[in-house]
Image (cartoon, grey):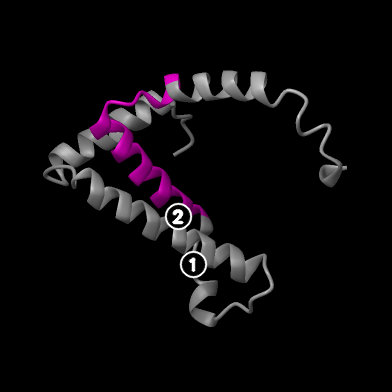
Amino acid sequence: MNKELTLKEAQTMVDHWIKTVGVRYFNELTNMAQLTEEVGEVARIIARRYGEQSEKPSDMEKDLGDELADVLWVLICLANQTGVDLTEALYKNMEKKNIRDKDRHRQNEKLQ
């Protein structure tokens, strides 16, 4: 599938799947725990593939893209069930960062 997907389309697609295949959303606390679990799976791949830990044969079969998509899926679920428009939230977040951090990183000697 090569079609580009907007955040709004992704939110609609996940919502449709949840309501037709998944029956209903897990509650927010369950989804938060699920998100934490999925982020942990991403961390494990990063630590072993790009960090200093050795990668086990079972880890080598893991697809980082798939695990990142799992994180995105649960994040979208949380946004949907709490009424957050991720497109609007991202634009607001970028505006905040552009104001708050416009010079901060350039002035950080650790990043030079």
Q: Which residue is mark 2?
A: 66
Tell me residue 91's x, y (percent): 51, 19
Residue 85 belongs to magenta span: yes
Mark 1 neighbour class, 10 Å CA radius: few under 14, some 14 to 19, many 20 or more: some
Residue 73 belongs to magenta span: yes
- 90 or 3: nearer the eye? 90
Does dot 2 land on a helix, a strand or a loop?
A: helix
Q: Identify the image quadrant of residue 67.
A: bottom left
Q: Identify the image quadrant of residue 46.
A: bottom right
Does dot 1 land on a helix, a strand or a loop?
A: loop
> Which image quarter is the N terminus in?
top left
Q: Which residue is mark 1?
A: 62
Image-based side of 20 in relation to 3, left or right: left
Amino acid type, residue under disc 1 in the picture: Lys
| Identity of the residue drawn at 36% across and 52% down | 35
Q: Are marks 1 and 2 in contact (CB under 8 Å)?
A: yes
Tell me residue 111's x, y (percent): 82, 43
- 66 or 84: nearer the eye? 84
Tell me residue 64's x, y (percent): 52, 58
Image-based side of 5 in relation to 51, left or right: left
Mark 2 neighbour class, 10 Å CA radius: few under 14, some 14 to 19, many 20 or more: few
Q: Identify the image quadrant of residue 51.
A: bottom right
| Identity of the residue drawn at 37% across and 60% down | 37
- The boundaries of the magenta stretch are 65-88
Marking on residue 96 = none
> Which image quarter is the C terminus in?
top right
| Identity of the residue drawn at 36% across and 23% down | 85
Tell me residue 82's x, y (percent): 26, 31
Amino acid type, residue under disc 2 in the picture: Asp
Image-based side of 56 in relation to 5, left or right: right
- 32 or 104: nearer the eye? 104
Q: CA distance from mark 1 to mark 2?
A: 8 Å
